[in-house]
Image (spheres, rainbow, N blue to C red):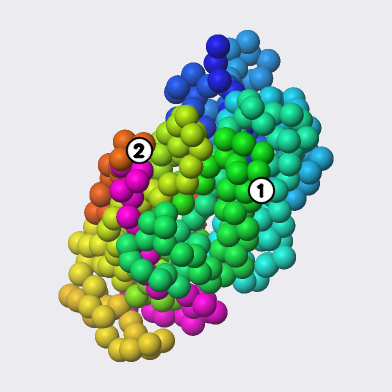
Amino acid sequence: MSKTALITGVTGQDGAYLAELLLSKGYIVHGIKRRSSSFNTSRIDHLYVDPHDPDAKFFLHYGDLTDSTNIIRILQQTQPDEIYNLGAQSHVQVSFETPEYTANSDALGVLRLLEAIRILGLEKKTRFYQASTSELYGKAQEAPQSETTSFYPRSPYAAAKLYAYWMTVNYREAYGLHASNGILFNHESPLRGETFVTRKITRAVAAIHHGIQDVIYLGNLDAKRDWGHARDYVEGMWRILQQDEADDYVLGTGETHSVREFVERAFGHIGIKIKWEGEGVDEVGKDAKTGSVLARIDARYFRPTEVELLLADPTKAKEKLGWTHTTEFKDLVSEMMESDLELLASETDRKQRHD
Ligand code: NDP
Ligand code: GDR
């Protein structure tokens, strides 16, 4: 018998990789997508099969984490063996602009799912994965950060995710749910949203290469992140739910790099060496050969409170799940650069044919 999984946030980066992984393992996969005025399924269109097809194994349902009614109905219809709660307003900076909405979707959304499991009497059947985050460590009290490091959230996003983390633990302890947190450090890919810093950089560098952009504007270049590849991390999510006992796990690479280093590597990929000059908001990144300015600072991208250093200690995941990252930082940057160079080349080509 195939297992049935339900993925919230299926249209996002991780949702797309996870849906593909679970389908490859023979699961029936249901995903929740939001109603949008424009198409929002580009990351999963290749997985879609007409639901009338008797072999269809991938189904989409309209829904939203801010609405209990659809959550209860979809759980009742799909009776999932596993729920992966990946849906969230996931942008840290945007959470300062929309703190109430962020709390509604990222914090209360989890409560709605956990309660729906209880209301429908699915406590024994359904396993629950919560997409927790290294942002919980925030103003980190130690480095590297493990499952025992204390939390200090630094944004409305992180505070909402803190509530979600503890509700997952509480429902496990109070009602015996198989509910687990994956505390995932930053993970990227060619499918990463365009406003997160890695993808913003690889897209801009590709655009500069193709002559359709002159310069990239960034915020804090000295923030450090533990960046891995999303493909590895969805494998970790699945392994977490296959354990006999529910528990919480850190997934990360155990290496940290600054935003500045990411910029240098991305430009390095197209043969440009970056030379930094100036300080603070006046700092610029120049092409070391030609002297032209390719990177500037825009204070709008600084956050009211920043998370300066994230570095994972993924020992527990390695020992208990047998999980480890397989893509190194330099290969991640290369893969994202190659993908954006190709994407922008075909966009430029298409535009020229229409001009
Ligand atoms: P994305 O931003 O790419 O995807 C988020 C998904 O959530 C999208 O499908 C989005 O829909 C959906 N969504 C947003 N708001 C709602 C809502 N109110 N109701 C239902 N769905 C909603 O994020 P990622 O794939 O990168 O991350 C997946 C999860 O993991 C998120 O919860 C994120 O906070 C968390 N996380 C991510 C890390 C990372 O480095 N990527 C690290 C640690 C945790 P739409 O497409 O319509 O916008
Ligand atoms: P983060 O990712 O906040 O870590 O959250 P993001 O890529 O947005 O920022 C990483 C770091 O880069 C600095 N930065 C910039 N960030 C953006 N977006 N744009 C810029 O121009 C820029 N310049 C510098 C930021 O200040 C920050 O320090 C991601 C999300 O996926 C969350 O959902 C997830 O929980 C965490 O990773 C782990």
Please tell me whether residue 302 belongs to the stretch shown in magenta: yes
SS assignment at label 2: helix
> Where is residue 222 drawn, in percent x and y?
34, 75
Say whether marks 1 and 2 touch (CB < 8 Å): no
Residue drawn at (45%, 73%), measured in percent from left and top?
Answer: 139
Residue drawn at (57%, 40%), measured in percent from left and top?
Answer: 179
Please state which amino acid type lies under the numbered disc 1: Val
Left or right: where 23 falls relative to 280: right
Query: Under 8 Å from ligand 1: the CB of mark 1?
Result: no
Q: How many marks?
A: 2
**Residue sitting nearer the eye, 53 or 94:** 94
> Where is residue 235 drawn, in percent x and y?
41, 36
Please state which amino acid type lies under the numbered disc 2: Lys
What crowding class fits label 1: few (fewer than 14 Cα within 10 Å), some (14-19), or many (20 or more)? many
Q: Which residue is mark 1?
A: 110
**Residue sitting nearer the eye, 230 or 147:** 147
**Residue sitting nearer the eye, 195 or 120:** 120
Residue drawn at (72%, 65%), measured in percent from left and top?
Answer: 100
Please tell me whether residue 223 belongs to the stretch shown in magenta: no
> Where is residue 201 drawn, in percent x and y?
39, 63
Please tell me which of labels 1 and 2 falls first in the chain: 1
Quadrant occupied by the N terminus? top right
Magenta stretch?
A: 292-318
Q: Which residue is mark 2?
A: 320
Q: Picture quarter containing residue 146? A: bottom left
Q: Is residue 183 above or below residue 118?
A: below
**What is the spatial separation of the Cα atoms under label 1 and label 2, in whole angstroms?**
26 Å
Q: Is residue 220 above or below residue 34?
A: below
